[in-house]
Amino acid sequence: MAYRKYTVTVQSVDGGNRFFIDGIQTPVLNLQEGNVYEFDTAHASNTGHSFKFSTNVDGTHADSGTELTANVSVTGTAGSAGSKTVIRIITGQANLYYFCGNHSGMGGAAITAGLDSNKAPSFVDNYRAEYAELKQNMANEPIKILSPGTNGSRIHQMVLTSDDPNNEITVHFGFKEMICENIAVNLVPGATPASDPFTLTKTVATNWVDDSTIQGLETNVLVTLGSSVLAANRGEYRVTSISNLVLTLANTPGNTITQELGLSITIWRWIPLFSMPVAANSGLSNNPSLSGLNTTYQQWLDNDRYFLINRDLWALNKGNTSSDQGSVYISTHVGDY
């Protein structure tokens, strides 16, 4: 058994708070079965933000979400001297999510598979390579990079190339969590489209909170509108209020929202893992490709430099809202359990 200590702080990101673990924003944690992990929450920034675990994304803020209390001990009050959360990872523990007991959207994921066995795995499927193109016209719409094997996958390497001759493109990797699909709305900007909150008003009689097809939508959640809206409207927005047929979203400063009526939209939540800047013409014109699984961008990687995944992995280019950047080609080499 090993004992590891992490330091937890809270910082404001894009208008909302996030947990930082050892200075990294909401990293995916690799928690090994049989080990004990201490999360030091004494820093003053944690005041009002209790650090908890759950087997549900966003914990008690999700529909039917519960807090994990077994094998977890909490000392003191977050933000005060000596406060900490300690967890022991038992054999067979389901993958976990850390979250704030008081506010949604602050936490991240923890992979709890038996990492000792993962050092020398037996693959149930052949070693394989997956290829994906993050196209120029995607404009902040994610593409699926790979789906894991039946019992998860171990990513050995990722290689990224770019055909954009001028722009460095930051590729964001993470999980896409669908909130709702095919909802009929009118999208209307505020009085000042570049700053004011905007609204999504349902054009059918079922209220947002009463629609059984909508999952995990609540105030303060950071959401993204799908590709059915104009590219300039596809940024990440925080839900500020839900009132009957009207959903109000805070605008990103400087982003001019354009009115769109009679839409059928999707809304999803992005759970970030890591981001990688891909240089212009990376992999072309005698320039080197960007090698993934680099601790420069993924500081939380295990010492063996393998990345374990048990759900679909997605990538997006958040900065390409004008569809004016090139494409990034992503090759991923994995072995399946």
Image: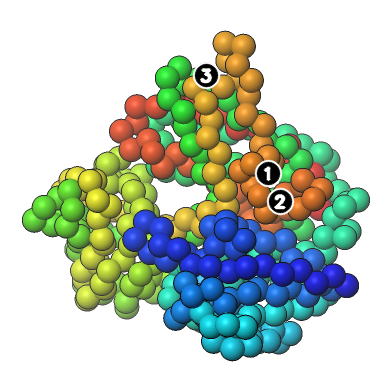
Label at residue 295: 1
Instruction: Judge by depth and name the residue closer to the eye, 79 or 104.
Output: 79
266 sits left or right of 332 in the view: left
- Which of the image's four quarters has the N terminus? bottom right
Report the amino acid beneath label 3.
Answer: Asn
Instruction: Judge by depth and name the residue closer to the eye, 188 or 282.
Output: 282
Circle 2/circle 3 CB separation < 8 Å: no
Give the quadrant of residue 87: bottom right
Q: Residue at x 46, y 28 (%)?
A: 168
Give the secondary structure at mark 3: loop
How many neighbours does mark 3 have within 10 angstroms: few (below 14), some (14-19), or many (20 or more)? many
**Is tag 1's residue or tag 3's residue first in the polypeptide sequence?**
3
Report the amino acid beneath label 2.
Answer: Leu
263 to 5, vertically: above or below: above
207 sits left or right of 156 in the view: left
Give the secondary structure at mark 1: loop
In the rendered image, is residue 267 in sight? Answer: no
Give the secondary structure at mark 2: loop
**Is tag 1's residue or tag 2's residue first in the polypeptide sequence?**
1
In the rendered image, is residue 295 in sight? Answer: yes
Residue denoted by label 3: 281
Residue 15, image x, y percentages: 34, 61
* Chosen colour scheme: rainbow
33 sits left or right of 73 in the view: right
Q: Residue furthest top?
A: 285
Label at residue 301: 2
Report the amino acid beneath label 1.
Answer: Thr
Q: Residue at x 42, y 66 (%)?
A: 17
3D distance between C-alphas at marks 1 and 3 = 22 Å
Give the quadrant of residue 139: top left
Residue 335, image x, y percentages: 79, 44
